[in-house]
Every structure is written in C-alpha cells, then in structure tokens.
C-alpha cells in the first residue's frame, strides 16, 4: 500500500525512514517507508508511506517491519491504510500483529449542480488570509476534531503554513465561517487527481462542537462545492471515518457516493516493551 502525497519532494531522512530490498540485478523488490513528521510525532504515532513486497514471503514483511521499528522507539503506534479488497496484504499484516483501528471511506461527487448557500443571520463566510488566519484555522480545526480518530493531535500554525505553500493549494479554496465576529467553522478545497483526472479534494471540514447539529456543516460543504464548480472542477472528492455516521449521512445526502473503502491498521509498539 502506497501513500503518494509529497513524493515530488520526498527524500529519506529522520522524518522519512526508508528501507528497500533488491535482487541480484539491483531491482527493488520490497520497500518500507514511514511518515514521521512533527504532526504525527505529536500524537506519538507514524504512518506508512509504503509497505510493499513483491516477494511473497512472510519473512520479507517481518524483516521490513523490524528494520523500520528501530526508528519508532519514542512512538506508541504506527498506522497503515489498506484497501478492503486487498485481502492478501491484510492477511500478511495481521500475521505481523497489526489490528484494525478504524475504517475510512473515499467518496466522490460528480454532480455539478449545487444548491444555494444561504447562511442564517449573523453568519458570514470569508476567505482564509495567509499570514493572518493561521491561528484561527488551528483553533477551529483542533476543537472540531478533538475526538475524531486519526485526527486527535492538534495542528499548529506551521502546519497551516505548509498547506498554503503546498502544490495543491488553491487561492480562496480555504474558507472560514464566522458567527458575528467568532470563527466557528473551516473548510478547505485543494487541487487533486483521481483516475488521472483533475478533481478538488475537500477537507478538513470542521465546526466547533457547540455549533454542530445546526446544518452549518452542510452549508459550509456547499460553499466549497460552489467554489469547485466556479473553478471548473467537474468532480469533488473527500474521505470520511467509518464511525462518523453524521458526516457520512451528510455527504450521501449532498450527492457523494462511496468509491473506495480502507481499513486503517495499527501496530501498537508498546506491546514490544
């Protein structure tokens, strides 16, 4: 399974420990690499970028895992996303001691029609201002995701600055919802690709807990969908945790359809102590 974000700038280092296995001709037959950036380490975790072997031998996977674990002594868990349809890899991973932590679903919307977005009185939506709104974005996102599996560690203004400077950044694609003068919601639309076609990726979408259940998330989603349409994206894509029933129901009602399902496997390295 490969997580291919940031591959254009990827290089093996302390944040990206990487090992490969080659055959006698120098051809790469297996590889393992972890994403251990500051965000993941704040949650005492890491995520696999790749964990794959063309050699169908359990000992090969065990060798790769043992090699990468050397770099994770200060962490509690490492995570790997595997498509549910990849039964053989799931079996190999489970034999290594990985267990399912949660499920995630990929959803796509292909309908260009977007309902009108009319916010209640005293609510306004504004574009994110680089260099000024980083702390606001963090406050809302962190409060909204505090109990969401896989997103519990808080982000920092530096993380937001990285989003703004990334290749997938879209001008005016990041939006903040205000109730009077109080920021209470955020949504991001980013440039992406799916099946070799351009698509806009929506996420994060977060609402402060005390403002949830008021249909504000639906309106914020529609505002992002309108932005996608106005910028000539024919499709939008997002991911949602399997246990987030409220979000899944919202996305289905807004025209999104499931196109992929993944199991998030975790390896609890504390069991090695």
Image (cartoon, rainbow, N blue to C red):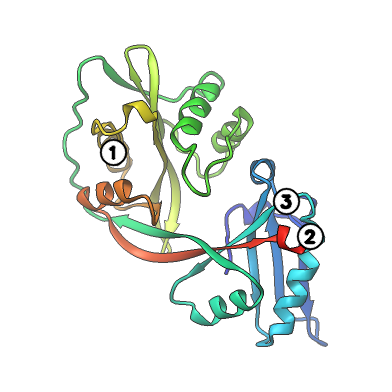
Marks 3 and 2, how far apart at CA = 12 Å
| Image: 182 above or below 221 | above
What residue is rendered at 46% in x and 44% in y?
A: 148
Q: Residue 75 carries which label?
A: 3
Q: Which mark is residue 273?
A: 2
Is residue 270 visible in the rendered image? The answer is yes
From the image, which quarter does the C terminus lie in? bottom right
Q: Mark 1 points at which residue?
A: 230
Number of other residues with Cα within 10 Å of mark 2, as a class: few under 14, some 14 to 19, many 20 or more: few
Is residue 233 visible in the rendered image? The answer is no
From the image, which quarter does the N terminus lie in? bottom right
Marks 1 and 2, how far apart at CA = 54 Å
> Which is more N-terminal, label 2 or label 3?
3
What x and y, as percent, mark residue 231? 33, 40
Q: Do the residues labelled 3 and 2 touch (CB within 8 Å)?
A: no
What x and y, as percent, mark residue 206? 40, 35
Number of other residues with Cα within 10 Å of mark 1, as a class: few under 14, some 14 to 19, many 20 or more: few
């Amino acid at each position: 399974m490969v997580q291919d974000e940031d591959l254009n700038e990827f290089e093996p280092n302390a944040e990206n420990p990487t090992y490969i296995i080659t055959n006698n001709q120098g051809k790469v037959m297996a590889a393992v690499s972890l994403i251990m950036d500051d965000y993941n380490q704040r949650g005492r975790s890491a995520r696999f970028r790749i964990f794959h072997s063309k050699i169908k031998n359990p000992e090969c996977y065990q060798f790769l895992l043992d090699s990468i674990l050397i770099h994770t002594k200060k962490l509690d868990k490492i995570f790997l996303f595997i498509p549910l349809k990849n039964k053989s890899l799931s079996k190999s991973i489970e034999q290594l001691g990985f267990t399912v932590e949660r499920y995630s679903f990929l959803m796509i919307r292909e309908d260009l029609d977007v309902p009108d977005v009319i916010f209640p009185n005293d609510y306004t939506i504004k574009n994110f201002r680089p260099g000024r709104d980083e702390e606001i974005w963090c406050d809302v996102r962190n409060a909204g995701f505090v109990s969401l599996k896989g997103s519990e560690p808080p982000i920092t203004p530096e993380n937001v600055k990285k989003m703004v400077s990334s290749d997938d950044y879209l001008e005016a694609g990041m939006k903040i919802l205000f109730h009077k003068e109080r920021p209470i919601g955020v949504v991001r639309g980013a440039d992406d690709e799916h099946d070799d076609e351009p698509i806009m990726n929506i996420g994060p979408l977060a609402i402060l807990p005390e403002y949830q259940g008021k249909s504000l998330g639906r309106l914020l989603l529609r505002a992002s969908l309108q932005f996608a349409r106005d910028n000539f994206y024919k499709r939008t894509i997002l991911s949602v945790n399997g246990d987030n029933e409220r979000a899944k129901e919202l996305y289905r009602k807004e025209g999104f359809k499931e196109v992929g399902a993944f199991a998030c496997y975790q390896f609890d390295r504390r069991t090695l102590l």
